[in-house]
Structures are given as structure tokens and as C-alpha cells.
Image (cartoon, rainbow, N blue to C red):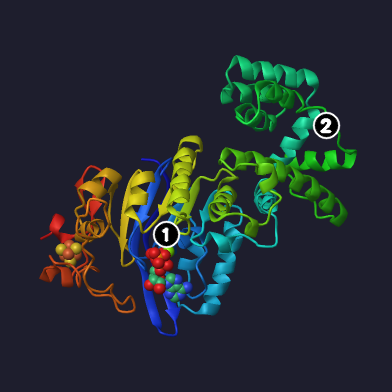
């Protein structure tokens, strides 16, 4: 099985004035390529901490005592686990090292939609600027190629390109092969975006595609764009760098318009000029999702992306996630305390309790035939329209400063046995692809 990312035995504690909270107590998660892995569990079960740990965004009072986050053959958290004796000072310098190491990955190959969408947008910057900024930071060569492609393309090129699009009914492969053969990389996404628009008629589409050529650009700008396209970073020389950034941001706005349009945002040309406070909650959430996805990352972590919006917008966002899954190559970790939301979007579901994954399996099985007592109770606590009695989960979540020995759920579990108070249950394979950490499943 090919994994996009795997979390192994991750243990994280938070050092606070009120004591040390053991937030993650051996989390194991494997994200497969192209899947949506839903993560559920009640408040405080460690869902966000797991997401933040994967992103390397833990606060300085968080100690990673063991475990790893494996991505692309390396352990992303290695700088944090190498600390022997914890102190916030030592942790802070390890976190700085981690941030330096993760800079080329975070936002480009792994990105996150945070639990509070309103706070992750900057209120004083246009949303187009914020989307463009992620492109300028992580993918400036793509922006350079897009612009240079319109400079290099002749009318003959775009006429032939239009013919290829029409003859192949907008096939991505055919268009990509054509632009590569003419050294016009970067033109394909612009042309296909126009071709797929359904707010304009065919004649207008043709005109716009034919016009993707013959752009004029100053010789200095052209040279700067060419060196960027060739793999050099953005020049450090102040005047040239300002000139180049202006061109890149303009191109970034252009790509932002295209991308927002594919996310179903009406009037994207206007939206990119707006500030976050001018947009509705659902629209802001789409902008946050656009920022997370614009660089085509391998892994996207979505932390409660629908909790701050009403049910109608929630349905639209879920549709969007399902659509994205079909269209992009990313793998998603979708965190939500709402199992019905996860039932909509996930391929597999992992249930967390007390900083551990207690059950994981295909969504139909976890939702219809759960095997862990906590999962069953969680499902029984979902309100339904058929008037079924809702049964809440009795008892209190454990104090994570001093979690109970043995199974972390033993103080609330109606089936708890002596063994459960002494030993931690391992994860038992109960059927194909279905794992449950409970002694009832094999270790009585
Ligand atoms: N910065 C922090 N300092 C101290 N404790 C923290 C910190 N962040 C999280 N915690 C604690 O870690 C535990 C796990 O928190 P986390 O935010 O991961 O839960 P969650 O499953 O995302 O919950 P929710 O559904 O409420 O978002 C909780 O007990 C929480 O109080
Ligand atoms: S291991 Fe024991 S306490 Fe834990 S869920 Fe299973 S039966 Fe309940
Ligand atoms: Mg959370």
C-alpha cells in the first residue's frame, strides 16, 4: 500500500502552569494516496493537535516525547524528538529548526485549513493578494512560466492550440503535450480554464484563447522571469526584486481568479479585489480552501472546515471537497466531531479518544458496524430525524494530566474488565482494513 503520509506512535504533551497534559498518547494513522481520511472524536481527543503536529506547528509548550510523521521518506518531526530533556527554551530553538526545514514543504506539499477560518485570513489584505502570496512564495517559477508563455506564444500557436482543444474536447493530456512541444508550458491551464468556463459563450471562449499570445514585456522583466523559470530564486537586488514581485503578484491574481472560479466562486474577478470582512462565511471558507489547495499539495489537512458555517453552506463545502477529491491528486485528512459530515466525504474513518486512535476502517463499516464501545456510543449520540432516543456518553472525559492506566476509555466503558485497568489494548485487526483497540476484539 502506498502512503501519502504516516503518523507512528506519536506522543505529545503540553506543559502548562496547571500541569502536563498528555494530549496524544501513541497516535497511529496512515493516509493513503488519493483518499479522504476522516478523523472524529469528542472535543479534546487530540484531533487538532495531530493536524498541527503533522504541519510542524505545535506551540513551544508542546513536547513531542516520541513518534514520527513520515512524509516522502523522512521524519518531519525529527528535530523535536531529538530533544532529550524538555525545556521551553530548548524546544523553541528546535521548533525554529523545524520551521526552517519545513519551509519548502509546508504550504506547498502539505497544507492545512485551520479550525478557525476567520482568523487564518489577514483582514487588511485583499483575498487575491493572500492567494497570490502563497504562489509567489512557493511556486514563483509557475507564475513566471504562465506569463512567459503568453509572451512567447504567437497567434499561430494559439490558433493551433484552439484546434487541439476542440479536436480533443478539452483533453488535458492532448493540450499538455501540445504546449510542451511548442515550449509554452504554463499556457495549458490558462487555456483549459477558459475552455471550461460556463458563464460565456463558445465564440467568446475562442477569442479569449486566441488572445493568450503576443504579450509585451520589458527586456529586464523578461530576463528576470526567465531566470526564475530556470530555477533561480527571486533576485535579492531591491529594485529588481520589487519589479519582479509586482509582475508575479499580478500573475498570481490572474491564477487566483481561475482557481476561485473552479471552486464555484461567482464573480471571482471582483472577489479577488475584496477584503475578508466583505465576504460571507461560506465564501471566506472557500478562500481559505483555495489558499490551501492552490499549490496542488500532496496532503491537505482540513480541521473542522464546516463547523463555522450554516447547514446550507456546509453542504456546499462538502460537495466541493468531494469534487476536489475527484479532480486533484491530493490526499485529505478531514477532521470533524460530526460523524454525519465524515460519512459524506470520507473513504475511511479514524475515531480518536484520549489522544489515541481507537478504531479505524472503511467508513461504511465504522459507521454501520462499529466494534469499539466508544464508537458505538458516539454513533448513538448523533441526533436523527426518526425520533430515535439520543444516548449521550456517560461519564467525564479523563483528566489528561493523569490519564487512567490501561485502556484510556476504561472509566466510561460499560464492558471494562480487570485487564482494561492494567494494560493498554493493542490495535486488533477485526476484518479487512478494520482495526480496533479494545480487548473485546481478541484479547480477553
Ligand atoms: N496550546 C495548548 N496548551 C495546553 N493544552 C493544549 C494546547 N492545545 C491543546 N491542548 C490540550 O490538548 C488536548 C487536545 O486538544 P485538541 O485541540 O487537539 O483537541 P480536539 O480534538 O481538536 O478538540 P476540538 O474538537 O475541541 O477541536 C486538549 O485537552 C487540550 O486542552
Ligand atoms: S479495552 Fe476494555 S475498557 Fe477499553 S473499550 Fe475495550 S472493553 Fe472497554
Ligand atoms: Mg480541534
Q: Residue at x 48, y 62 (%)?
A: 52
Q: Quadrant of residue 130?
A: bottom right
Q: How many marks?
A: 2
Q: Residue at x 64, y 17 (%)?
A: 164
Does 246 appear above or below 377?
above
Of residues 324 and 109, the one nearer the viewer is 324
The x, y position of residue 154, in whole percent, is 80, 23
User: Viewed as shown, does residue 150 lie left or right of 165?
Assistant: right
Which residue of the protein is positioned furthest toward the bottom in this rendering?
Answer: 17
Question: Does the image show residue 74?
Answer: no
Residue under pointer 2: 215
User: Viewed as shown, does residue 17 lie left or right of 205?
Assistant: left
In terms of sequence position, does the residue under pointer 2 or pointer 1 come before the other? 1
Q: Residue at x 70, y 58 (%)?
A: 125
Mark 2 burial class by Cα count in 10 Å: few <14, some 14-19, many 20+: some
Mark 2 CB lies closer than 8 A to ligand 3: no
- In the rendered image, the quadrant that contains the C terminus is bottom left
Indicate which label's residue lies in the foreground, 2 or 1.
Answer: 2
Residue under pointer 1: 68
Amino acid at each position: 500500500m502506498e502512503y501519502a503520509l504516516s503518523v507512528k506512535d506519536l506522543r505529545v504533551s503540553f506543559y502548562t502552569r496547571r500541569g502536563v497534559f498528555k494530549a496524544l498518547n501513541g497516535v497511529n494513522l496512515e493516509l493513503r494516496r488519493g483518499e479522504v481520511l476522516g478523523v472524529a472524536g469528542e472535543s479534546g481527543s487530540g484531533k487538532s493537535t495531530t493536524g498541527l503536529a503533522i504541519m510542524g506547528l505545535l506551540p513551544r509548550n508542546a513536547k513531542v516525547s516520541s513518534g514520527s510523521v513520515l512524509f516522502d521518506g523522512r521524519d518531519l518531526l525529527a528535530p523535536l524528538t531529538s530533544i532529550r530533556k524538555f525545556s521551553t527554551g530548548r524546544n523553541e530553538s528546535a521548533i525554529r529548526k523545524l520551521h526552517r526545514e519545513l519551509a519548502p514543504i509546508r504550504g506547498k506539499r502539505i497544507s492545512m485549513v485551520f479550525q478557525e477560518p476567520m482568523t487564518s485570513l489577514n483582514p487588511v489584505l485583499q483575498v487575491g493578494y493572500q492567494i497570490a502570496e502563497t504562489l509567489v512564495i512557493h511556486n514563483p517559477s509557475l507564475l513566471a512560466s504562465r506569463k512567459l508563455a503568453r509572451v512567447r506564444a504567437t497567434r499561430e500557436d494559439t490558433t493551433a492550440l484552439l484546434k487541439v482543444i476542440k479536436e480533443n474536447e478539452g483533453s488535458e493530456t492532448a493540450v499538455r503535450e501540445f504546449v510542451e512541444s511548442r515550449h509554452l508550458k504554463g499556457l495549458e491551464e490558462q487555456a483549459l480554464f477558459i475552455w471550461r468556463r460556463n458563464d460565456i459563450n463558445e465564440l467568446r471562449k475562442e477569442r479569449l484563447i486566441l488572445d493568450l499570445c503576443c504579450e509585451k514585456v520589458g527586456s529586464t522583466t523578461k530576463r528576470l522571469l526567465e531566470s526564475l523559470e530556470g530555477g533561480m530564486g527571486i533576485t535579492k537586488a531591491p529594485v529588481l526584486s520589487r519589479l519582479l514581485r509586482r509582475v508575479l503578484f499580478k500573475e498570481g491574481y490572474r491564477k487566483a481568479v481561475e482557481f476561485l472560479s473552479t471552486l464555484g466562486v461567482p464573480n471571482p474577478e471582483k472577489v479577488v479585489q475584496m477584503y475578508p470582512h466583505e465576504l460571507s462565511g461560506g465564501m471566506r471558507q472557500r478562500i481559505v480552501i483555495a489558499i490551501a489547495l492552490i499549490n496542488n499539495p500532496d496532503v491537505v489537512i482540513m480541521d473542522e472546515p464546516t463547523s463555522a458555517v450554516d447547514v446550507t453552506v456546509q453542504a456546499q463545502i462538502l460537495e466541493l471537497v468531494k469534487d476536489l477529491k475527484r479532480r486533484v491528486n491530493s490526499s485529505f485528512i478531514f477532521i470533524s466531531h460530526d460523524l454525519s459530515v465524515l460519512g459524506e466525504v470520507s473513504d475511511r474513518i479514524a475515531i480518536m479518544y484520549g489522544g489515541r486512535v481507537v478504531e479505524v476502517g472503511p467508513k461504511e463499516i465504522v459507521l454501520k458496524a462499529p466494534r469499539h464501545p466508544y464508537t458505538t456510543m458516539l454513533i448513538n449520540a448523533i441526533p436523527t430525524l426518526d425520533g430515535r432516543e439520543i444516548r449521550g456518553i456517560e461519564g467525564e472525559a479523563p483528566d489528561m494530566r493523569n490519564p487512567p492506566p490501561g485502556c484510556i476509555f476504561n472509566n466510561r466503558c460499560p464492558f471494562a474488565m480487570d485487564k482494561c485497568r492494567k494494560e493498554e489494548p493493542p490495535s486488533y485487526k477485526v476484518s479487512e482494513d478494520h482495526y480496533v483497540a479494545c480487548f473485546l476484539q481478541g484479547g480477553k
